[in-house]
Amino acid sequence: MVNLKRTREDILSSVGELIHRQGVQSTGLKELFAVSQVSSGSFYNYFESKDELAHALIDFKWSELKAAILIPAMNASRDPIANLFWMIDRLEEKHLSDPNCAGCLLGNLIVDLVEHDTSFQEHLVQVFDEWQSAIAQLLQAGQSQLQTHITPEELAEQLLTMIEGVLLMERLYKQPARLQRGFNMIRALLKASLAQANRFNA
């Protein structure tokens, strides 16, 4: 049944899981109308096209990720390196709790949309640059704990690349144990970059 009172945020929230599973390009407008419980007219009141919905969904999901994990990680403790481990742990928990093992929605959209329209490449580069910058900020704040040859910006790039690679493999294999091994490799890279890695041994 169509719900005429659905808000823009309601629509983005309701279509997120469907697009997470099958992508924007493989999802038809009728499917979007059905899952969001809005008429075509109501949908177009908020979004002029499916592409505009996809851009809005990128911002919506990025805001959710920042609110749930990135921003809390910046202030989880007074130790920036411990806070980075906290971020990694929360990301692992988030994806282990996903029964669909669909990987990272933002990462999935790179494959789905970047070749479709250059505006998506620009948009997603902005998102991932911001995420990488947040990781680098923690590493810079904890640089005294890093080995002297480690560059925070380069390590941040390595960590984010590993995170997205692990989540992409999660989507392919759908094996929680493999996901856990992947996140253990991410933690191992960070530990190997520390002057005193044993500080963070379990």
Image: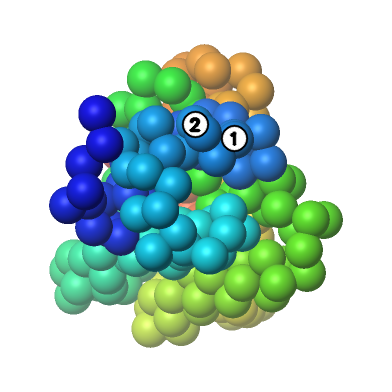
Q: Residue at x 44, y 47 (%)?
A: 40
Report which quarter residue 143 is drawn in.
Answer: bottom left
The answer to whether residue 168 of the structure is visible from this angle is no
Proximity of marks 2 and 1: CB atoms separated by less than 8 Å: yes
Q: Which mark is residue 164?
A: none
Q: Left of 66 or right of it: where is 49?
A: right
> Spatial distance from mark 2 to mark 1, Cα to Cα?
6 Å
Secondary structure at numbered mark 2: helix
Q: Amino acid at mark 1?
A: Thr
**In the rendered view of the protein, which quadrant contains the N terminus?**
top left
Report which quarter residue 65 is drawn in.
Answer: bottom left
Q: Left of 22 or right of it: where is 75?
A: left
Name the residue tied to disc 2.
31
Task: Please tell me whether residue 19 is drawn above or below residue 149 in the rendered image.
Answer: above
**In the rendered view of the protein, which quadrant contains the C terminus?**
top left
Q: Residue at x 66, y 33 (%)?
A: 26
Secondary structure at numbered mark 1: loop
Q: Residue at x 54, y 70 (%)?
A: 127
Q: Position of residue 15 (x, y in %)?
A: 40, 41
Q: Which mark is residue 27?
A: 1
Task: Please tell me whether residue 131 is drawn above or below residue 183 in the rendered image.
Answer: below
Q: Position of residue 162 (x, y in %)?
A: 62, 49
Report which quarter residue 79 is drawn in.
Answer: bottom left
Q: Nearer the viewer, residue 71 or 56?
A: 56
Q: Amino acid at mark 2?
A: Glu
Q: Nearer the viewer, residue 58 or 67?
A: 58
Q: Residues within 10 Å of mark 1 (few under 14, many from 20)?
A: some
Q: Nearer the viewer, mark 2 or mark 1?
A: 2
